Image (cartoon, rainbow, N blue to C red):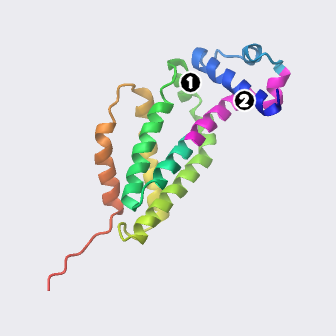
Amino acid sequence: MCNKNTKEHIIEVAISLFNRFGYKKTTIDEIAEIADKSKGAIYHYFESKEELFRVIIDRKFEKLHLELTSAVDSGVTGKSKIEKYVTTRVSVFKDLFRIEKSLKNEYLIYLRSIERVRIKHDEKEILMVMTILKTGVKNGEFENEDINESAVDIVAILKGLEMPLMLYDNIEIEKNIEFMIRILQKRIERKTILVIS
């Protein structure tokens, strides 16, 4: 088995054990045993259990970014791109948080550690939203205001939805997505002035 396959196998085993028993109760010894590797082999790829957990979280955010990129690229106008961005983000996050209760609770405990992983993903997402806004400005759909500030605001608003999506399995956020998209579009929409001659 080549190194890449070994590392991937360890990650798959860790995901399975974290989902089943939670982060806290899963040990490196158990991961090594189920992966049929030595403890030293685990530490060859990952400094600690926390680093392994962060790699798993990092991959979840990579998946989110790929899905967001695909969705946004399928839009033509700034408005359609922002709509696809919001609906896809909410949908993907809802799926990401369909995890075992034990891991969900521990996600909250290790939120500070996870936030360190998120910084680069947040930056990529802000750049994506800036590109959407620039498309809208170019098409005359959005105001040519501070695009960077608007992008940061939009990402922050959507990050604010993550906790409810994680904590409440039965939340029906889809009903409010259209309303939220309209609010975001109103904030950035170009105001047309009717001139009566």
Few, some or many residues within 10 Å of mark 2 (<14, 14–19, 20+):
few
Residue 76: image location, x then y, percent: 41, 60
Residue 61: numbered disc: none
The residue indicated by pointer 1 is 106
Q: Residue at x 67, y 34 (%)?
A: 55
Q: Residue at x 59, y 47 (%)?
A: 121
Q: Is residue 46 visible?
A: no
Residue 170 quadrant? top left
Helix or strand or loop: what does disc 2 sit on?
helix
- Residue sticking out furthest to the left: 197
Q: What is the span of residues highlighted in magenta in the rendered image?
A: 40-63
Most frequent secondary structure within the magenta stretch = helix
Question: In which quadrant is the N terminus drawn?
Answer: top right
Q: What amino acid is at disc 2?
A: Glu
Asked if residue 144 is positioned above or below residue 187 in the image, the reply reads below
Image position of 88 (left or right of 184): right
Q: Is residue 57 magenta?
A: yes
Image position of 40 (left or right of 15): right
Image position of 59 (left or right of 130): right
Residue 8: numbered disc: 2
Q: Residue at x 81, y 18 (%)?
A: 37
Q: Residue at x 63, y 41 (%)?
A: 117
Asked if residue 155 is positioned above or below residue 77 in the image, the reply reads above
Asked if residue 83 is positioned above or below residue 64 in the image, the reply reads below
Residue 75: image location, x then y, percent: 42, 56
Residue 7 quadrant? top right
Q: Is residue 118 magenta?
A: no
Residue 77: image location, x then y, percent: 39, 61
Q: What amino acid is at disc 1?
A: Glu
Helix or strand or loop: what does disc 1 sit on?
helix
Q: Earlier in the sequence, mark 1 or mark 2?
A: 2
Question: In which quadrant is the C terminus drawn?
Answer: bottom left
